Image: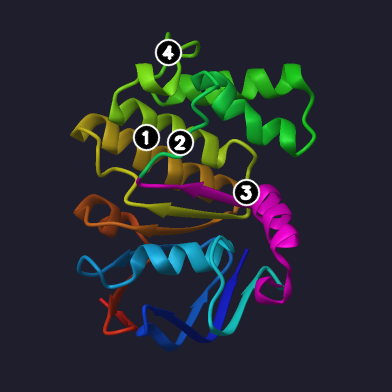
Amino acid sequence: MDIRVRGLTKRHGGVAIFQGLDLDVAAGEFVALVGRSGAGKSTLLHLLSGIDAPDAGSISLGGTELTALDEAARTAFRRRHLGLVFQSFNLVPSLDALDNVRLPLELTGLAPGRAREAADALMGALGLDGLSDRFPEQLSGGEQQRVGVARAVAHRPGLVLADEPTGSLDLDNAVAVIDLLSRACRERGSTLLMVTHSQDVMDRADRLLRLADGRLLPA
Protein backbone atom coordinates (compact mmCIF):
# COMPACT_ATOMS: atom_id res chain seq x y z
CA MET A 1 0.00 0.00 0.00
CA ASP A 2 1.52 3.31 -1.05
CA ILE A 3 1.28 6.56 0.93
CA ARG A 4 0.71 9.93 -0.71
CA VAL A 5 0.41 13.02 1.49
CA ARG A 6 0.00 16.54 0.15
CA GLY A 7 -0.13 19.86 2.00
CA LEU A 8 -0.68 18.29 5.43
CA THR A 9 -1.38 20.90 8.11
CA LYS A 10 -2.02 20.23 11.80
CA ARG A 11 -2.10 22.58 14.77
CA HIS A 12 -2.24 21.90 18.50
CA GLY A 13 -3.19 24.78 20.78
CA GLY A 14 -2.63 27.26 18.00
CA VAL A 15 0.90 25.97 17.34
CA ALA A 16 1.56 24.49 13.88
CA ILE A 17 2.98 20.96 14.08
CA PHE A 18 2.86 20.55 10.29
CA GLN A 19 2.21 23.21 7.70
CA GLY A 20 2.13 21.93 4.12
CA LEU A 21 3.95 18.63 4.72
CA ASP A 22 4.31 16.25 1.75
CA LEU A 23 5.22 12.55 1.89
CA ASP A 24 5.50 9.74 -0.65
CA VAL A 25 6.15 6.12 0.33
CA ALA A 26 6.07 3.35 -2.27
CA ALA A 27 4.09 0.16 -1.72
CA GLY A 28 6.27 -2.41 0.04
CA GLU A 29 8.85 0.14 1.19
CA PHE A 30 10.32 0.11 4.71
CA VAL A 31 10.84 3.69 5.91
CA ALA A 32 12.33 4.63 9.28
CA LEU A 33 11.26 7.99 10.70
CA VAL A 34 13.55 9.78 13.16
CA GLY A 35 13.52 13.14 14.89
CA ARG A 36 13.82 14.78 18.28
CA SER A 37 11.16 14.34 20.96
CA GLY A 38 8.21 16.61 20.27
CA ALA A 39 8.90 16.90 16.54
CA GLY A 40 5.50 15.40 15.72
CA LYS A 41 6.42 11.82 14.78
CA SER A 42 3.58 10.23 16.74
CA THR A 43 1.17 12.91 15.52
CA LEU A 44 2.07 12.03 11.94
CA LEU A 45 1.30 8.35 12.55
CA HIS A 46 -2.04 9.25 14.13
CA LEU A 47 -2.91 11.30 11.05
CA LEU A 48 -1.82 8.56 8.64
CA SER A 49 -3.91 6.01 10.52
CA GLY A 50 -7.03 8.18 10.51
CA ILE A 51 -7.15 8.25 14.32
CA ASP A 52 -6.73 12.01 14.09
CA ALA A 53 -7.78 14.33 11.25
CA PRO A 54 -5.62 17.10 9.74
CA ASP A 55 -6.65 20.74 9.63
CA ALA A 56 -5.86 20.79 5.91
CA GLY A 57 -4.26 18.66 3.21
CA SER A 58 -4.88 15.18 1.87
CA ILE A 59 -3.79 11.65 2.81
CA SER A 60 -4.14 8.85 0.27
CA LEU A 61 -3.40 5.24 1.25
CA GLY A 62 -3.39 2.69 -1.54
CA GLY A 63 -5.56 4.97 -3.64
CA THR A 64 -8.13 5.56 -0.89
CA GLU A 65 -8.49 9.22 0.07
CA LEU A 66 -8.46 8.84 3.84
CA THR A 67 -9.21 12.51 4.44
CA ALA A 68 -12.43 12.22 2.42
CA LEU A 69 -13.87 9.52 4.71
CA ASP A 70 -16.04 10.11 7.76
CA GLU A 71 -14.97 8.73 11.14
CA ALA A 72 -16.88 5.46 10.79
CA ALA A 73 -15.42 4.80 7.34
CA ARG A 74 -11.90 5.63 8.56
CA THR A 75 -12.34 3.15 11.43
CA ALA A 76 -13.49 0.42 9.04
CA PHE A 77 -10.58 1.13 6.67
CA ARG A 78 -8.07 1.09 9.54
CA ARG A 79 -9.44 -2.18 10.92
CA ARG A 80 -9.08 -3.99 7.61
CA HIS A 81 -5.99 -2.47 6.00
CA LEU A 82 -3.70 -1.07 8.72
CA GLY A 83 -1.56 -2.56 11.46
CA LEU A 84 -0.72 -0.26 14.35
CA VAL A 85 1.95 -0.64 17.03
CA PHE A 86 1.59 1.96 19.79
CA GLN A 87 4.04 3.09 22.47
CA SER A 88 1.24 2.62 25.01
CA PHE A 89 0.49 -0.94 23.76
CA ASN A 90 -3.33 -0.33 23.66
CA LEU A 91 -4.17 -3.94 24.43
CA VAL A 92 -7.75 -4.77 25.42
CA PRO A 93 -7.49 -5.30 29.21
CA SER A 94 -10.43 -7.72 29.38
CA LEU A 95 -8.90 -10.09 26.79
CA ASP A 96 -5.98 -12.45 27.36
CA ALA A 97 -2.87 -12.20 25.20
CA LEU A 98 -4.00 -14.75 22.61
CA ASP A 99 -7.41 -13.15 22.21
CA ASN A 100 -5.80 -9.73 21.78
CA VAL A 101 -3.90 -11.14 18.80
CA ARG A 102 -6.88 -13.11 17.53
CA LEU A 103 -9.30 -10.16 17.65
CA PRO A 104 -8.24 -8.37 14.42
CA LEU A 105 -8.32 -11.68 12.54
CA GLU A 106 -11.90 -12.38 13.52
CA LEU A 107 -12.92 -8.77 12.83
CA THR A 108 -11.80 -9.27 9.23
CA GLY A 109 -13.92 -12.42 8.91
CA LEU A 110 -11.48 -15.28 9.57
CA ALA A 111 -13.07 -18.34 11.15
CA PRO A 112 -12.41 -18.59 14.92
CA GLY A 113 -10.40 -21.80 14.66
CA ARG A 114 -8.11 -20.48 11.94
CA ALA A 115 -7.77 -17.17 13.77
CA ARG A 116 -6.64 -19.00 16.89
CA GLU A 117 -4.06 -21.04 14.95
CA ALA A 118 -2.62 -17.95 13.27
CA ALA A 119 -2.51 -16.02 16.54
CA ASP A 120 -0.81 -18.90 18.33
CA ALA A 121 1.86 -19.12 15.61
CA LEU A 122 2.62 -15.41 15.90
CA MET A 123 2.86 -15.66 19.68
CA GLY A 124 5.40 -18.44 19.27
CA ALA A 125 7.43 -16.45 16.75
CA LEU A 126 7.80 -13.67 19.32
CA GLY A 127 8.78 -15.93 22.22
CA LEU A 128 5.41 -15.60 23.94
CA ASP A 129 4.73 -19.33 24.35
CA GLY A 130 3.07 -20.03 27.67
CA LEU A 131 1.66 -16.51 28.01
CA SER A 132 -1.46 -16.94 25.86
CA ASP A 133 -3.89 -17.03 28.80
CA ARG A 134 -2.40 -14.07 30.65
CA PHE A 135 -4.13 -10.72 30.70
CA PRO A 136 -2.26 -7.49 29.88
CA GLU A 137 -1.90 -6.53 33.55
CA GLN A 138 -0.11 -9.84 34.14
CA LEU A 139 2.48 -9.15 31.42
CA SER A 140 5.63 -7.08 31.58
CA GLY A 141 5.94 -3.99 29.41
CA GLY A 142 8.13 -5.87 26.95
CA GLU A 143 5.70 -8.78 26.76
CA GLN A 144 2.79 -6.40 26.16
CA GLN A 145 4.75 -4.73 23.37
CA ARG A 146 5.40 -8.06 21.65
CA VAL A 147 1.72 -8.97 21.91
CA GLY A 148 0.94 -5.60 20.33
CA VAL A 149 3.32 -6.32 17.45
CA ALA A 150 1.76 -9.75 16.86
CA ARG A 151 -1.69 -8.17 16.83
CA ALA A 152 -0.58 -5.50 14.35
CA VAL A 153 0.59 -7.98 11.69
CA ALA A 154 -1.86 -10.81 12.33
CA HIS A 155 -4.40 -9.80 9.66
CA ARG A 156 -1.74 -9.15 6.98
CA PRO A 157 -2.32 -5.40 6.66
CA GLY A 158 -1.21 -3.45 3.61
CA LEU A 159 0.41 -0.80 5.82
CA VAL A 160 2.04 -1.14 9.25
CA LEU A 161 2.60 2.02 11.30
CA ALA A 162 4.88 1.41 14.28
CA ASP A 163 5.70 3.95 16.99
CA GLU A 164 8.99 3.00 18.71
CA PRO A 165 8.09 -0.73 18.78
CA THR A 166 11.39 -1.75 20.42
CA GLY A 167 11.58 1.05 23.02
CA SER A 168 10.65 -1.15 26.00
CA LEU A 169 12.47 -4.31 24.90
CA ASP A 170 15.83 -5.84 25.72
CA LEU A 171 18.26 -6.43 22.86
CA ASP A 172 17.24 -10.03 22.06
CA ASN A 173 13.52 -9.27 22.03
CA ALA A 174 14.08 -6.02 20.11
CA VAL A 175 15.85 -7.99 17.38
CA ALA A 176 12.99 -10.51 17.32
CA VAL A 177 10.44 -7.73 16.90
CA ILE A 178 12.41 -6.00 14.14
CA ASP A 179 12.84 -9.36 12.38
CA LEU A 180 9.13 -10.16 12.60
CA LEU A 181 7.98 -6.75 11.40
CA SER A 182 10.45 -6.50 8.53
CA ARG A 183 10.01 -10.14 7.44
CA ALA A 184 6.21 -9.97 7.62
CA CYS A 185 6.18 -6.83 5.51
CA ARG A 186 8.74 -8.12 2.99
CA GLU A 187 6.99 -11.45 2.52
CA ARG A 188 3.52 -9.92 2.19
CA GLY A 189 4.49 -6.81 0.26
CA SER A 190 3.27 -4.59 3.09
CA THR A 191 4.54 -1.06 3.59
CA LEU A 192 6.25 -0.35 6.92
CA LEU A 193 6.67 3.13 8.42
CA MET A 194 8.44 2.98 11.77
CA VAL A 195 9.27 5.76 14.22
CA THR A 196 12.52 4.80 15.90
CA HIS A 197 15.72 5.77 17.65
CA SER A 198 17.23 2.32 17.08
CA GLN A 199 20.29 2.11 14.86
CA ASP A 200 19.39 -1.52 14.04
CA VAL A 201 16.07 -0.33 12.59
CA MET A 202 17.74 2.47 10.65
CA ASP A 203 20.24 0.02 9.17
CA ARG A 204 17.47 -2.30 7.93
CA ALA A 205 15.19 0.35 6.47
CA ASP A 206 15.07 1.10 2.75
CA ARG A 207 14.99 4.81 3.49
CA LEU A 208 15.52 7.10 6.46
CA LEU A 209 13.54 10.32 6.93
CA ARG A 210 14.06 12.99 9.57
CA LEU A 211 11.18 15.10 10.86
CA ALA A 212 12.32 18.58 11.89
CA ASP A 213 10.56 21.95 12.02
CA GLY A 214 7.44 20.45 10.49
CA ARG A 215 9.27 19.13 7.44
CA LEU A 216 10.44 15.71 6.29
CA LEU A 217 14.05 15.56 5.13
CA PRO A 218 16.32 12.72 3.97
CA ALA A 219 18.51 11.61 6.88
What is the secondary structure assignment of the residue under circle 4?
loop
Q: Count how many numbered circles sit on residues in the image.
A: 4
Q: Earlier in the sequence, mark 1 or mark 4?
A: 4
Q: CA distance from mark 1 to mark 4?
A: 13 Å
Q: Amino acid at mark 4?
A: Leu
Left or right of 14 in this view: 52:
right
Give residue 69's position: percent from left, percent from top.
Answer: 73, 70
Residues at marks 1 and 2 touching, judged by CB atoms closer than 8 Å = yes
68 drawn magenta: yes
Of callouts 3 and 2, which one flags the residue occurring earlier in the amino acid sequence? 2
Label 2: how many Cα within 10 Å (few below 14, some 14–19, many 20+) = many
Q: Is residue 32 visible?
A: no
Q: Amino acid type of disc 3?
A: Pro
Give the quarter of the figure containing the N terminus.
bottom right
- In space, the residues marked 3 and 2 are separated at their CA atoms by 14 Å
Give the label, 4 or 3, closer to the camera: 4
Q: Quadrant of residue 165?
A: top left
212 magenta-colored: no
Q: Residue at x 55, y 80 (%)?
A: 5
The amino acid on which the numbered mark 2 sits, given as a three-letter code, is Gly
Q: Which residue is label 1 attached to?
A: 145
Say which residue label 2 marks.
148
Extent of the magenta region? 65-87
Quarter that holds the C terminus: bottom left
Q: Decide which of 157, 30 is in the foreground and name it.
A: 157
Asked if residue 193 lies left or right of residue 55, the reply is left
From the image, tell me which residue sits under label 4: 131
Task: Compare residues 75 and 196 and report the one nearer the observer.
Answer: 75
